[in-house]
Amino acid sequence: MSATEALGPLYGLVQPVLITEGITHRQLSQVLRDAAHEAGDILGSLSAGGIGTVVHSAQLTAAQQSLSLMATETWAKVGSITQAGMYAQAQLAADQALDLDMFSGMPPMALQQMAQAIHFEAAQAVESLISRHTSGVQLADRIYANGKVTTKQVGSIIDRALAQQVSHRELAARVKAFYRPDVPGGASYAAQRLARTEINNAHHDTTIRLAQPKPWVLGFRWNLSSSHPRPDPCDDYAHADFGMGEGVYPKDEVPRRPHPQCLCYVTHVQEDDEVFTNKLAKGDYDDYLNERGVRC
């Protein structure tokens, strides 16, 4: 065998990623529940005329301003949670990139220095991803734009309520439902979609970035997620052949995730154990190791 994937058990690779996603999901759900409650309080202040009193446009000016401010603050919290998830995913990628079992004969202090260097590189990868323009827009700009979209969508809910002459109670229920995480669509879907996309991009990009300088890594294999309901570009990626086997990409040609909420992942294709051991003994990897504190 000329090359082997640095896989380990699939559970060991994917489970920490899912745990991080779960933590992010719970944090976002709490933020959205809080937003739904706050929206109810804001609109509840209109009901002085009684629960059945219809909503009038003149009553809503101050309330809409408060809802707009709340949308901005809510999405700022979404952005903070998303970035924290991105850093967590990057650190998971760093843990998976340490290859400590391959260097078990090295002094513990040298291995600790290498681990610190790789985790620092992972943090740099996330900072680059956060500041990078995706389709011309930075993450901070996407967060801001989502806040504006949310304000517009809530405005549409209010406009429909005015046209239908619904009660204050019904209007509050509609706006609260827009934020509640247990109601499909609305702000909850948009927030979870953005967070899942970005934190998985962080793991994907960091995995690639950390492996690029490793001389024993030959390329990357694109692994399909089991969550694909129908064929999409990921299937093409998993079956493309660049002369290294199906779904295996040279280090400088591995693609980015092609769509939001993509759960596919890449794994290393590297030298087999015997080749690795011989090259390590010959000093072929010394430059990489010395740059990360491992003195050979």
Image (tube, rainbow, N blue to C red):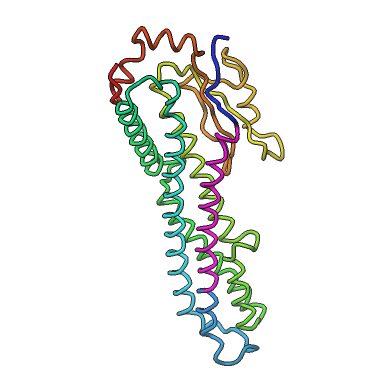
Quadrant showing the N terminus: top right
- Residue 229 lies, in percent from the top left, at 71, 40
Rendered residue at 71%/37% (across/down) = 230
Residue nearer the viewer, 87 or 54: 87
- Is 27 left or right of 175, judged from the image as shown? left
Q: Toward the viewer: 94 or 251?
A: 94
Report the predominant secondary structure element of the magenta stretch: helix
Residue shown at 67% from the left, 37% from the top = 226
Compared to residue 275, the image places residue 72 above or below, namely below
Residue 23 among magenta residues: yes
Q: Position of residue 17 (x, y in %)?
A: 53, 41
Q: Nearer the viewer, residue 200 or 54?
A: 200
Vertically, is 275 above or below 115?
above
Relative to residue 22, is residue 166 drawn left or right?
right
The boundaries of the magenta stretch are 10-37
Residue 131 pos. (x, y %):
37, 43
Picture quadrant of residue 235: top right
**Up-down relation of residue 90 to residue 75 (above or below):** above
User: Where in the figure is residue 185, as x and y percent of width and height?
Assistant: 63, 59
Q: Could you tell me which residue is drawn at 60 percent across and 22 percent down?
A: 247
Q: Is residue 252 magenta?
A: no
Q: Quadrant of the C terminus?
A: top left
| Corner quadrant of residue 123 | top left
Examine the rendered structure and indicate whether residue 279 appears above or below residue 117: above
